[in-house]
Image (cartoon, helix red, strand yellow):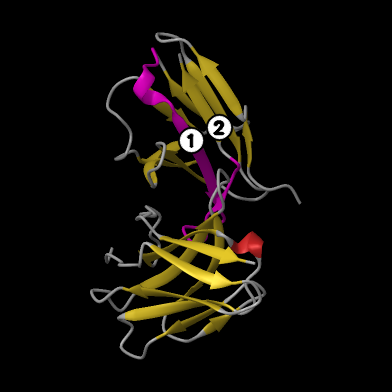
């Protein structure tokens, strides 16, 4: 599975959009991009995933570049409860060994 | 619609004792995964099980650790003769197929 690179931390003002970048330049054609988050002391929570098209659900939007070498997770209106570590993970079809890197620690400030 | 249930939430053991951690997957899920998270570190994959089968245990320490997922009942992660270095949060996840994993709240093991 391809490796990912994320900034270690980011700040965001409450009510504004949080844009979390992820680089996965070695991604292969059958690998999906998954995003999870872990709020302090809780279990990781699935957010969204995609292959090559942009995706949106009730939690977030996922924008994947045309060459698939990077993606951005967008939380449209961040709240204080969105403060968490966000993990970008690349996983093969049928893959299960989810490799959690260091992630991005997002601080949402009032 | 219950999520992944782990118990106990907190477990205290003395060195040399056994720790048994339980995980009940989401209804309908037959794939279970165990991860360990040491303080201030990321989650590390330990083992992947389907009913009555260990599919991948490449992340499990070779000694003292074992896991099972019987036909009936929860998945069990068993740590024999615990040492202080086993102190960590242990998370279980389940999935319908090998895709989106849903995590439990974890068991925090403290070894005195």
Q: Chain of mark 1?
A: B
Residue toward you, A12 or B93: A12
Q: Secondary structure at mark 1?
A: strand
Q: Which residue is mark 1?
A: B90
Residues packed near mark 1 inside 10 Å, few (<14), some (14 to 19) or many (20 plus): many
> Which residue occupies 27% across, 66% down?
A2
Q: Which residue is mark 2?
A: B107
Q: Which residues are magenta?
A: B81-105
Q: Tell me how far mark 1 sits from mark 2, CA to CA.
A: 5 Å
Q: In the rendered image of this protein, does residue B8 appear above or below residue B19?
A: below
Q: In the rendered image of this protein, does residue A26 appear above or below residue A89?
A: below
Q: In the rendered image of this protein, does residue A98 appear above or below residue B49?
A: below
Report x, y in % for residue A37.
52, 59
In the displayed structure image, the side of residue A99 where residue A85 appears, left or right: right
Asked if the residues shown at circle 1 and circle 2 are in contact, with their CB atoms under 8 angstroms apart, the answer is yes
For the C terminus of chain B, which image quadrant?
top left
Residue toward you, A85 or B108: A85
Q: Is residue A56 magenta?
A: no
> Which residue occupies 40% across, 16% down?
B82
């Amino acid at each position: 599975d391809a490796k990912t690179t994320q900034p270690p931390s980011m700040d965001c003002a409450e009510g504004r959009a949080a844009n979390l970048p992820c680089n996965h330049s070695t991604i292969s054609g059958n690998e999906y991009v998954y995003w999870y988050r872990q709020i302090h002391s809780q279990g990781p929570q699935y957010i969204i995933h995609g292959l090559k098209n942009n995706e949106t659900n009730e939690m977030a939007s996922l924008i994947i570049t045309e060459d698939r070498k990077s993606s951005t997770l967008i939380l449209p209106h961040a709240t204080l409860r969105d403060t968490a570590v966000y993990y970008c993970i690349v996983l093969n079809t049928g893959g299960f060994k989810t490799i959690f890197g260091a992630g991005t620690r997002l601080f949402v400030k009032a | 619609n219950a999520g992944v249930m782990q118990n106990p939430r907190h477990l205290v053991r003395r060195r040399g004792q056994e720790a048994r951690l339980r995980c009940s997957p989401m209804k309908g899920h037959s794939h279970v995964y165990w991860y360990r998270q040491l303080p201030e570190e990321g989650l590390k994959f330990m083992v992947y099980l389907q009913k009555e089968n260990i599919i991948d245990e490449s992340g499990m320490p070779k000694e003292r650790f074992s896991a099972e997922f019987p036909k009936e009942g929860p998945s069990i992660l068993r740590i024999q003769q615990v040492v202080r270095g086993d102190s960590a949060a242990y998370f279980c996840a389940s999935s319908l197929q090998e895709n989106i994993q849903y995590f439990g709240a974890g068991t925090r093991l403290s070894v005195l």
